Amino acid sequence: MKPADVISQDTPWGQLPALMLPAYGETWLMVIIVMLFVVSFGGVLGVVLFNSSRQGLFPQPTLHRSLSGLVNIGRSLPFLVLMAAIIPFTFWLTGTTIGIPAAVVPMIIAGTPFFARLVENALRELPAEVTAVGLVSGGSVWQIITRAQLSEALPAIVAAVVLNLISMIEYSAIAGTIGAGGIGYLAVVYGYQRFDQHIMIATIIVLIVTIQLVQFLGDRVIAALQPHQGKHRL
């Protein structure tokens, strides 16, 4: 139960912007850094996963099973457990176990296999003719992947980016438990540990509004891309 003498320690509403704005900026800094790596690594991994399957350009059952197993392992652990489990690796890589660098490492490790699977699924949903037309046209593997597969799957891939972006915002809040900064750190240190209800309410509202805005903008981009499907084939 909240002690009676702590009630008066709620941060005045007028002082919240001074705390929330820097934390909000830190959250987006973490998320942007993570998404750059996740989209790059996860995108390549997803393309290789699909094209090493029986439906792909270079079927390699052993490679596909191995990569698929690694992706499944990466998706198996809850983020909080993963973050704690790789603390030695995070320290070896960044030299610290707190702050933004310590949060970015597990977020990338958690986000990459998730995005890779989403990209693989997006490519798997394409009609087989997309790859077949590229092959018949004499396109190289690179041309077929970029101009046929990825172009046709672009709306689904953007949807995957939006979904992953939302997940990374949520993960950044969880990373506040290791002092990573951002909105999550405010919620843990001020909202939970200091029983600051104003901070807790503000962080919840900010996270809800942010997620809704990201989803809304993502839906608009996806809707704008869909009419252009089929115009970029070889």
Image (tube, rainbow, N blue to C red):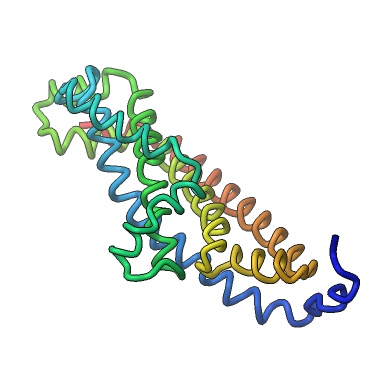
Choose top left, top right, bottom left or bottom right for residue 201.
Answer: bottom right
Q: Residue 113, position in %: x, y?
A: 36, 40
Please give left or right for residue 156 compared with residue 167 in the image: left
Choose top left, top right, bottom left or bottom right for residue 115.
Answer: top left
Placement of 39 over or under 230, stated as above or below? below
Please give left or right for residue 26 compared with residue 201 in the image: left
Q: Quadrant of the C terminus?
A: top left
Total numbered badges shown on the rendered structure: 0
Choose top left, top right, bottom left or bottom right for residue 98.
Answer: bottom left
Q: Residue 178, position in %: x, y?
A: 51, 64
Residue at figure coordinates x 59%, y 67% from the top left: 185
The residue positioned farthest toward the right in the image shown:
4
Please give left or right for residue 44 compared with residue 125 in the image: left
Q: Residue 214, position in %: x, y?
A: 56, 52
Residue at figure coordinates x 12%, y 25% from the top left: 137
Q: Nearer the viewer, residue 125 or 11?
A: 11
Q: Nearer the viewer, residue 70 or 234?
A: 70
Q: Nearer the viewer, residue 154 or 105?
A: 105
Placement of 78 over or under 15, stated as above or below? above
Q: Quadrant of the N terminus?
A: bottom right
Residue at figure coordinates x 23%, y 26% from the top left: 64
Q: Nearer the viewer, residue 44 or 112?
A: 112
Q: Residue 180, position in %: x, y?
A: 50, 67
Placement of 27 over or under 223, stated as above or below? below
